[in-house]
Image (cartoon, helix red, strand yellow):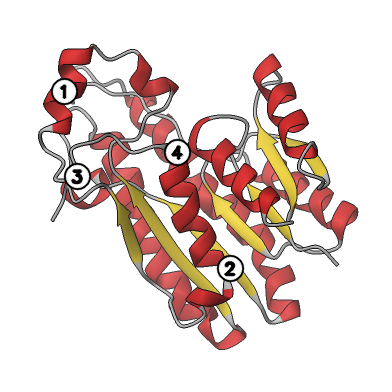
């Protein structure tokens, strides 16, 4: 029986590449997104072309009831969830002097509370099987902080604390919990930056290149594979050495 990976926020960017990586390895995919779009359709077709099944699980992870439904749909369709990747995330960047309370709470609710909501609903099924992998997508700014991102950095730092605590709770049930902290990755969010800004950022990266979503996906898959069976509670930075 094929294994099943549930990846939140997986219709584009890093989440999409994670879904494609798992599909290439034979996993059936639970594809989560909030709003239907052409991009969603293209992602679904791309994954299906790899010969696996795709379950569309539309829903907002910041809403507990919708998160519950996402997980119920996955169990109803596949009967199991072997890997959970909490990838869904948003930004509302601005300095705190200009940040509205809703800008702070929205980022915390999607990025951090959303991670709790989905995980809370998945864990009982993993505990019943006495196995599973949970990989949470944090960020290097959750480690270092970043001006203009106190909401985003707080959410990603929270994910690190959540990961380490959960790893201790679930280790006895053979459920491994780790986090991946990407650095500067080429996505639609970074496409809007001027080339001069990108060049400035590259100078801060020892490998002298901006990361690709595939770089993150490969590390996430490693943490889901048998090769990482003695790794839990860790935060792997995928940042080209930026935070060394």
Name the residue tied to disc 4: 213
Residue 81, x across and y down, in percent: 73, 62
Quadrant in the rendering for residue 9 = top right
Asked whether the residues under the numbered discs 2 and 1 touch, taking CB atoms below 8 Å apart as contact, a structural biologist would say no
Residue 80, x across and y down, in percent: 79, 64
Name the residue tied to disc 3: 207
Q: Which badge, 4 or 1, is on the more N-terminal residue?
A: 1
Q: Which badge, 2 or 4, is on the more N-terminal residue?
A: 2
Name the residue tied to disc 2: 133
Q: In what element is the residue under mark 4?
A: helix
Would you place residue 66 above or below residue 147 in this image?
below
Q: Which badge, 2 or 3, is on the more N-terminal residue?
A: 2
Residue 222, x across and y down, in percent: 50, 64
* 50, 189: nearer the viewer: 50
Q: Which badge, 1 or 3, is on the more N-terminal residue?
A: 1
Kindly identify the residue that appears in the image at 41 percent across and 46 percent down: 215
Q: In what element is the residue under mark 1?
A: helix
Q: In what element is the residue under mark 3?
A: loop
Residue 233 seen anywhere in this rendered image of the structure: yes
Asked whether the residues under the numbered discs 2 and 4 touch, taking CB atoms below 8 Å apart as contact, a structural biologist would say no
State the CA–CA distance, disc 2 to disc 4: 20 Å
* 111, 55: nearer the viewer: 55
> Local crowd at mark 2 within 10 Å, few (<14), some, or many (≥20)?
many
Name the residue tied to disc 1: 199
Q: Which badge, 2 or 1, is on the more N-terminal residue?
A: 2
State the CA–CA distance, disc 1 to disc 3: 13 Å
> Local crowd at mark 3 within 10 Å, few (<14), some, or many (≥20)?
few
Q: Quadrant of the N terminus?
A: bottom right
Kindly identify the residue that appears in the image at 16 percent across and 51 percent down: 243
State the CA–CA distance, disc 2 to disc 1: 36 Å
Quadrant in the rendering for residue 134 = bottom right
């Amino acid at each position: 029986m094929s294994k099943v990976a549930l990846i939140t926020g997986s219709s584009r960017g890093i989440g999409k590449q994670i879904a494609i990586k798992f599909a290439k390895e034979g996993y059936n995919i639970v594809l989560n997104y909030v709003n239907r779009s052409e991009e969603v359709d293209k992602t679904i077709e791309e994954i299906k072309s790899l010969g696996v099944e795709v379950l569309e699980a539309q829903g907002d992870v910041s809403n507990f009831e919708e998160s519950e439904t996402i997980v119920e749909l996955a169990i109803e369709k596949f009967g199991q969830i072997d890997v959970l990747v909490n990838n869904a995330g948003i930004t509302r960047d601005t300095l705190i002097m200009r940040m509205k309370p809703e800008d702070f709470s929205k980022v915390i609710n999607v990025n951090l509370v959303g991670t709790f909501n989905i995980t809370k609903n998945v864990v009982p099924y993993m505990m019943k099987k006495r196995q599973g992998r949970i990989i949470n997508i944090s960020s290097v700014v959750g480690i270092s902080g970043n001006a203009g991102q106190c909401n985003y950095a707080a959410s990603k730092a929270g994910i690190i604390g959540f990961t380490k605590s959960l790893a201790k709770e679930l280790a006895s049930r053979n459920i491994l919990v780790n986090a991946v902290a990407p650095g500067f990755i080429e996505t639609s969010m970074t496409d809007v930056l001027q080339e001069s800004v990108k060049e400035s950022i590259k100078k801060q990266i020892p490998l002298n290149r901006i990361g690709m979503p595939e770089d993150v996906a490969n590390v996430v898959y490693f943490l889901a594979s048998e090769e990482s069976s003695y790794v839990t509670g860790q935060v792997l930075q995928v940042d080209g050495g930026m935070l060394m």
